[in-house]
Amino acid sequence: MNSDQLINNRIIDGFDLDIPDAKSQRLTSAWLMLALGSLVVAGLLTILIVMSRTPGVQEIFPWIDFFHTALVVHVDLTVLVWFLSCAGIFWTLNSTGKCSRCGWGALWLAVIGTAVISLSPFLGAGSPLMNNYVPVLQDPIFFVGLGVFGLGFTLLVLRGLLYSKPMGRAVSGAGALRFGLMTGLVIALISVAAAVASYLGIPEIIEGQHYYELLFWGGGHTIQFTHIQLMLVAWLWLATMSGLNVKLSPRIAVLLFALGAIPALMTIYVYVAFDIGSGEHMLWLTWLMQYGGGIAALPMALALIPAFFGARKNADDLIRAQRSALFFSILLFGIGGIIGFMISGSNVTIPAHYHGSIVAVTLAFMGVIYHALPRIGFRKPSGAMARFQPSIYAAGQMMHVIGLAWSGGYGVQRKTAGAAQGLESIEKIVSMGMMGLGGLIAIIGGTLFLIVVFKAMWPEKRL
């Protein structure tokens, strides 16, 4: 049975969205190009970042200073531009097509901002600060790029809130997905408002890295819930499109999306109840993410996992790629969550935790992009490369995450490179070596994703 037959069999009772109109298809394609472009630039930086922390290689070149500058741009391209561009794909796919000028305006602001961020180190920007969520280069050029991108994202969110397709009166699978997408939009607006409130409310005496920590702490914590809501949308969508028999009603899915949004809505209370910069303000936001991040993901994962055991084996390449992306997304989100409860002190267990979580989101987005390609006018991904890419990427990332968690148990500090890591024992060397090898395998998996997608997007007459 091919993917088209399976889709036709599951669409009536499953979770799926309508094929977008021509205007939305073109705009979705543009958001996809921005997302892919951010990965291309970030991928080039990743090679040097991983090598700068790998035993046996780190001593060859004095990359410690470069490590921090490259890491700022890399994190902003992957955690900020990639995720928010993928959000643009989701929300544009579900848009009515109205106010297309607003949609293109948001896209071009995001493109210009991304270009400035990427080029800022070559235009003289420096003095990196490794604050959480949105690390910065202390230079006006970088901040202009970041601000322009932020304006583009804000316009994207406002258009989505006004011109998304409605859920409908009857709770269907499509309606449940649309409700999930709308909760992501509401949370994103709260995240933007949190960043603005932090900017206006930070005491004037605070400066340096602590200032930027406070500036992005509220919005950074809150936007994670948008990523999770979109990941859950992707889980249900991929489950249906890969032919899994999901024993979850649309009404229960809506309840889970609502449950997942509650901790993010509590952000409003935190800003009203506590002064920005106070211990209570930061601690409450941390608690909301720590204890609320998986509140909807866990029951949804438990509902989806049994469906894998009855799945058909003779599926085509696209179905197997989507199914693989879904499975490993669930697995890595679980691993990241478990590691989160093991955090003690400021060591590499922290990046192990968030790498597991963000890679889970990335895998879900990769699967949706594979599915969306033929819906927005491109060819369907096929071949062994498409079939095995999610597995290769996930295997490398699992090695990377486990290596970081293992080294964190021996006290290897985060945001360090070279000799500063203090790899004086065999346990630290082996665990960080595992991290490095896993990172390189993940780079291969990420590169294969780009090849598969660009091949599907390339005009057929040129192949």
Image (cartoon, grey):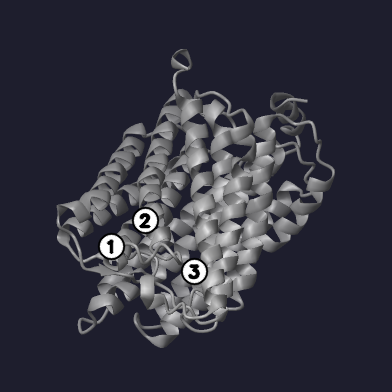
Are circles 1 and 2 on residues that touch, CB within 8 Å?
yes
Neighbor class of circle 2 (other Cα within 10 Å; few <14, some 14-19, many 20+) is some
Mark 3 = which residue? Answer: 351
Are circles 1 and 3 on residues that touch, CB within 8 Å?
no
At mark 1, the secondary structure is helix
At mark 3, the secondary structure is helix
Sequence-wise first label, 1 or 2: 2
Mark 2 = which residue? Answer: 48
How far separated are the C-alphas under marks 1 and 2? 9 Å
- The residue type indicated by label 1 comes to Phe
At mark 2, the secondary structure is helix
Give the quarter of the figure containing the N terminus: top right
Q: Nearer the viewer, mark 3 or mark 2?
A: 2
- The residue type indicated by label 2 comes to Leu
Q: Position of residue 196 (x, y in %)?
A: 31, 66
Name the residue: 40% across, 71% down: 218
Sequence-wise first label, 3 or 2: 2
Left or right of residue 121: residue 153: right
Mark 1 = which residue? Answer: 66
